[in-house]
Amino acid sequence: SESRITITALLAQSLSHSSHVVIDTTNDDVPRVESVSFGNDILGAARNVYGSGDNISVRVLFSQEVIVQARPNVSQLDLPSLELNVQQNTSEQAFAFAFLKSQVVGYRTRSLLFEFAVETHHSQGFLNYRSMESLQSNDYSINDAFGRHVSLSLPSKMSGLSLGASRSIEVNSSPAFISSIFPSLDESFYEFG
């Protein structure tokens, strides 16, 4: 990627006639993913099990500000996604996707928020992303302020910076049921009504 940008100054007479301003980004690191965690709504919740109809938010934090923009000339726009290790009971597919919340498209930010909608066929004992390559830009570009593509590689799943390390979350869409009841009192104390 290009690491030099030349800007011609047109307003300041001393610069516009005699020189160019050069911004050298050669030693400036390309932004990278620092950590992945559940959103504040999930981190602050008392429950650890989520089921059908629930939304689970996931936050991806970058080392510098990034901007998400739609690629030109693409008719069907698929938002950036994060592949999660969710089992789907309806197929052999062992993953599902959290999609970027579209409110951040076009704005500079260090944090991208994704949302995973739990469906009836989803289950997973320990929710995490599938691999270090699970973050996909799809029909969008994710760049830094200089227009350079950012690194989308995620922290190792075993790292303290991974989604699973931020909190233990289970996805279980099986309905709860009572298999048996054992009364603690003598039967004579119970009444109908």
Image (cartoon, grey):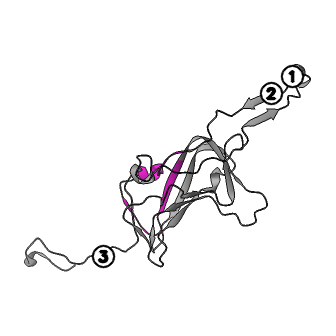
Label 2 Cα neighbours within 10 Å, binned few <14 / some 14-19 / many ≥20: few
Q: Which residue is mark 1?
A: 15
Q: Crowdedness of circle 3 by 10 Å Cα count: few (<14), some, many (20+)?
A: few
Residue 178 locus on image (x, y percent): 26, 76
Residue at left 69%, top 60%? Answer: 139
The residue that disc 3 covers is 177
Marked residue nearer the N-terminal end (2 or 1): 1
Horizontally, is 18 left or right of 173 in the view? right
Instruction: Work out how far the residue at label 2 is from the one at label 1, CA to CA, in angstroms.
Output: 8 Å
* Apparent side of residue 74 relative to residue 11 in the rendered image (left or right): left
Label tally: 3
- 109 or 18: which is nearer to us? 18
Q: Residue 153: where, in percent of width, then height?
A: 55, 51
- Say what secondary structure mark 2 lies in: strand
Please, what is the three-letter code of the amino acid marked with disc 2?
A: Val
Residue 21 shows which numbered tag? 2
Residue situated in front as seen by the camera: 38 or 53: 38
What's the residue type where badge 3 is placed?
A: Phe
Whether 186 is among the magenta residues is no
144 is higher (above) or lower (below) than 87:
above
**Residue type at tag 1:** Leu
- Image quadrant for the C terminus? bottom left
Above or below, comparing residue 153 to residue 9 in the picture: below
Which quadrant: the N terminus? top right
Q: What is the span of residues highlighted in magenta in the rendered image?
A: 33-60
Question: Circles 2 and 3: CB distance less than 8 Å?
Answer: no
User: Gap in Å between the C-alphas at discs 2 and 3?
Assistant: 70 Å
Question: Which badge, 1 or 3, comes first in the chain's sequence?
Answer: 1
Residue at 7%, 75% (x, y): give it: 186
Q: Nearer the viewer, mark 2 or mark 3?
A: 2
Image position, residue 156 (x, y; %): 45, 51
Label 1: element kind = helix
